[in-house]
Image: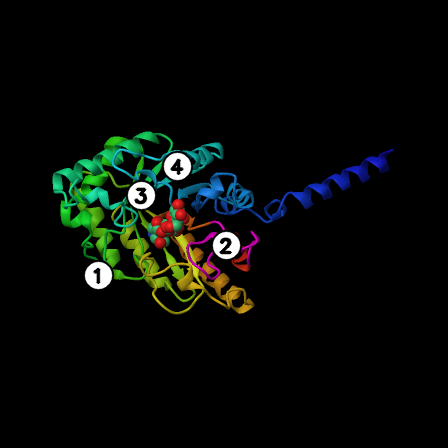
Amino acid sequence: MKLQRATINAALCFIVLLTAGPACCDSQPTLKDVFAKDFLIGAALNNAVVSDKDPNAAAIVQRHFSAITAENVMKWAPIHPEPNRYDFAPADRFVAFGEKNKMFIIGHTLVWHHQTPSWVFKDANGSDIGREVLLERMKDHIFTVVGRYKGKVKGWDVVNEALAEDGRLRKTRWMNIIGEDFIAKAFEYAHQADPDAELYYNDFSLDTEKEKCDGAVAIVKNLKSKGLRIDGVGIQLHGGLDYPDKESLEYAITALAATGVKVMITELDIRTRSWGYRGADINRINRQSTTDSGAADDETQQKLAQKYAELFSVFLKHKTDVNRVTFWGVYDATSWIGGSPLLFDRNYQPKPAFFAVVKTAQE
Ligand code: G3I
């Protein structure tokens, strides 16, 4: 009788393993556990992950990550496409996924010069509006969006990518119409909308361009001089196989931490194509422009593993300042860039880089 039961149990286990998909068999240690004493580990989620359209990706998120960022659904264009119309359904699904899985939920992003519809800056005749009208529209948007998720979204990327590479403010429509204080106003409105939410400034190339990092330090100091709340700065860290170097990354972490804010790695991925534009401006880079025919080669995968291990050794060295590391995506097939940028491959399998990252924590 016992032999029969054992046989049946073994058969059932085999069937479960066969039918549950790749992520179920992940017997490796989980990222959120190996770094539990160091910093939150997160991922940016697309709409498919939180809409039951990519269950294997959702399984990876539930197993490995303790923080989630909305990759797109909370940007102005998708959530507020017309003056009197909001589309909250995708963002509601994102927040519900985070609450169900008891994750730290980050809203991305309230004020950005990309993915903001033109109507925001125009009057009914199509002419540019003035400072006061645009401030009113910014306030209405922030109060509506942040207010809806009050107490649920724990941190907001309030302003995204306001700096040019030389550390001066970009000449965006936000800047040209309102003036330099559009940043302060955005943080003021976000704090009024949810006094308990953490508020962040987020940008790319802070880890490679010293002047740009110094520009972010200046933004923090300016906000603090006005008595405004800012809790952290996001170093996006869209890196490559040979950048950022340790020194420039450590400069950014220490310079930003010295202002008294948390430092977060907010959009981590590593492009494997070794040439071309190194920033993250969507006008200059996308999946097509970063394809890499050698992405799956062992040599590439070993270089990727080495670079991720090097970056995580820096994060661990500065873990008193770094409080979160978020990957910009879950697995390679749905990354915003081509090549082999993340820890899980196109078939949801952990890559050598995954094991190299886990090893840094165990060392
Ligand atoms: O949802 C629409 C869909 O309805 C439409 O049919 C389709 C075709 O145009 O577009 C879809 O929207 C796309 C969206 O991703 C969702 O897939 C936008 O065109 C596309 O531009 C958008 O790209 C995102 C990009 O930001 C611009 O918002 C990327 O997925 C996203 O990874 C990228 O992330 C940015 C961060 O927010 C800020 N830091 C840099 C980072 C990389 O550029």
In which image quadrant can residue 185 be found? top left
Q: Is residue 331 magenta?
A: yes
Q: Which residues are the magenta region? A: 330-351
- Residue 275 lies, in percent from the top left, at 39, 69
Label annotation for residue 18: none
- Tag 2 and tag 4, C-beta contact below 8 Å: no
Question: Is 132 in front, or is 234?
Answer: 132
Q: Amino acid at mark 3?
A: Ala
Q: Is residue 347 magenta?
A: yes
Q: Amino acid at mark 4?
A: Ala
Cα separation, mark 4 vs mark 3, equals: 12 Å
Q: Amino acid at mark 2?
A: Ala
Assess disc 4: are there few (<14), some (14-19) or many (≥20) residues with their C-alpha within 10 Å of its C-alpha.
Answer: many
Assess disc 3: are there few (<14), some (14-19) or many (≥20) residues with their C-alpha within 10 Å of its C-alpha.
Answer: some
Confirm or reject: label 3 Cβ below 8 Å from ligand 1.
yes
For marks 4 and 1 on the same chain, the one whose residue lies earlier in the sequence: 4
Q: Amino acid at mark 1?
A: Asp
Cα separation, mark 4 vs mark 1, equals: 34 Å
Q: Is residue 181 left or right of residue 156?
A: left
Mark 4 or 3, closer to the camera = 3
For marks 1 and 2 on the same chain, the one whose residue lies earlier in the sequence: 1
For marks 2 and 4 on the same chain, the one whose residue lies earlier in the sequence: 4
Cα separation, mark 2 vs mark 4, equals: 22 Å
Cα separation, mark 1 vs mark 2, equals: 33 Å
Q: Which residue is rendered at x = 44% and y = 35% of the image?
A: 93
Find disc 1 in the rendering and name its residue.
166
Label annotation for residue 333: 2
Find disc 4 in the rendering and name its residue.
91
